[in-house]
Image (cartoon, grey):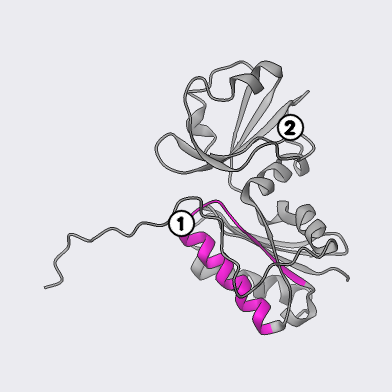
């Protein structure tokens, strides 16, 4: 088996890992149990490696979601990936959460007929999402950014043809964006959908600096002061 890459996706509520080899997906694990990233990411990786009688050192790279997404989830994924890379001397790769959602739509045949644009959405808060606009071929047309959704959001794109809104922030927008060309698919990004972008990153040797790599949070985590009395 060549080009063996461990894939880690923990940016949202779904914890998932996968193993790529010979240009295809060879193993996959996922859990939607709330806040399971810290407890399941490493065991899932061990399971998929044991399944193929492999050690981490037998792999060629580790690819992790770079965000945007959950602060805690991203920290778990990146910390795990860095630990594997440092321990086994492997290069680190990363794929954006929105790119993963776009490839998920493509790989799983979820694009509507005559799809004009794919707009992945990662849930932020209230009516805000992290998003960007992509072509059906996967080309990103604008920068990833937080955006407050209202009735006029993406009107220009919707007027041109069917648009797929995909991600864990899609469903809450369905009552706001009512254009007939809008299609909504509520789902979390999966490690399995990282396959093609990860292989592209690996073949082009776009490795990250393992020591200094940080996830793409967009918004910084804000710690709140507890009102509970310690004594």
Residue 34's disc number: 1
Decide: is 115 above or below 11: above
Q: Nearer the viewer, residue 179 or 218?
A: 218
Which of the two discs, 2 and 1, labels the residue nearer the N terminus?
Answer: 1
Q: Quadrant of the N terminus?
A: bottom right
Task: From the image, state whether disc 2 or disc 1 is nearer to you.
Answer: 2
Name the residue tied to disc 2.
Answer: 111
Q: Quadrant of the C terminus?
A: bottom left
* Left-right relation of 123 to 131: left
From this view, report whether residue 225 is shown above or below residue 154.
Answer: below
Q: Main secondary structure of the magenta part?
A: helix
Mark 1, other Cα within 10 Å: few <14 / some 14–19 / many ≥20: few
Give whichever of 55, 142 is nearer the camera: 142
Bounds of the magenta span? 61-87
- Report if residue 69 lies within the magenta region: yes
Please provide percent x and percent y for residue 32: 53, 54
Where does residue 64 sit, x and y in percent of width and height?
Answer: 65, 63
Residue 89 belongs to magenta span: no
- Characterize the local packing of mark 2: few (<14), some (14-19) or many (20 or more) Cα atoms within 10 angstroms: many
Q: Position of residue 104 (x, y in %)?
A: 71, 45
User: Is residue 176 toward the left or the right of residue 50 in the image?
Assistant: left
Question: Image point 59% across, 71% down: which residue?
Answer: 212
Badge 1 element:
loop
Q: Quadrant of residue 127?
A: top left
Q: Are marks 2 and 1 in contact (CB under 8 Å)?
A: no
Work out whether 102 lies above or below 217: above
At a point 78% along the width and 23% down the height, the residue shown is: 114
Q: Is residue 195 left or right of residue 100?
A: right
Outermost residue, left side: 231
């Amino acid at each position: 088996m060549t080009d063996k890459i461990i894939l880690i996706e923990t940016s949202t509520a779904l914890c998932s890992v996968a193993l790529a080899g010979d240009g295809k997906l060879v193993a996959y694990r996922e859990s939607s149990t709330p806040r399971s990233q810290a407890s399941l990411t490493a065991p899932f990786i061990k399971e998929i490696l044991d399944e193929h009688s492999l050690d981490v050192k037998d792999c060629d790279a580790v690819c992790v979601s770079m965000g945007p997404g959950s602060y805690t989830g991203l920290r778990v994924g990146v910390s795990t990936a860095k630990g594997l890379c440092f321990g086994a001397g492997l290069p680190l790769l990363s794929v954006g959460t929105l790119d993963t959602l776009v490839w998920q739509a493509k790989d799983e045949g979820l694009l509507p007929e005559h799809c004009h644009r794919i707009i992945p959405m990662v849930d932020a808060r209230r009516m805000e999402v992290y998003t960007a606009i992509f072509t059906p071929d996967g080309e990103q047309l604008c920068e990833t950014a937080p955006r407050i959704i209202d009735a006029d959001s993406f009107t220009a794109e919707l007027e041109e043809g069917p648009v797929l809104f995909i991600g864990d922030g899609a469903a809450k927008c369905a009552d706001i964006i009512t254009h007939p060309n809008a299609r909504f698919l509520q789902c979390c990004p999966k490690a399995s959908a990282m396959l093609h972008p990860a292989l592209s990153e690996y073949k082009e040797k776009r490795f990250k600096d393992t020591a200094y790599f940080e996830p793409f949070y967009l918004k910084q985590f804000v710690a709140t002061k507890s009102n509970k009395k310690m004594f």
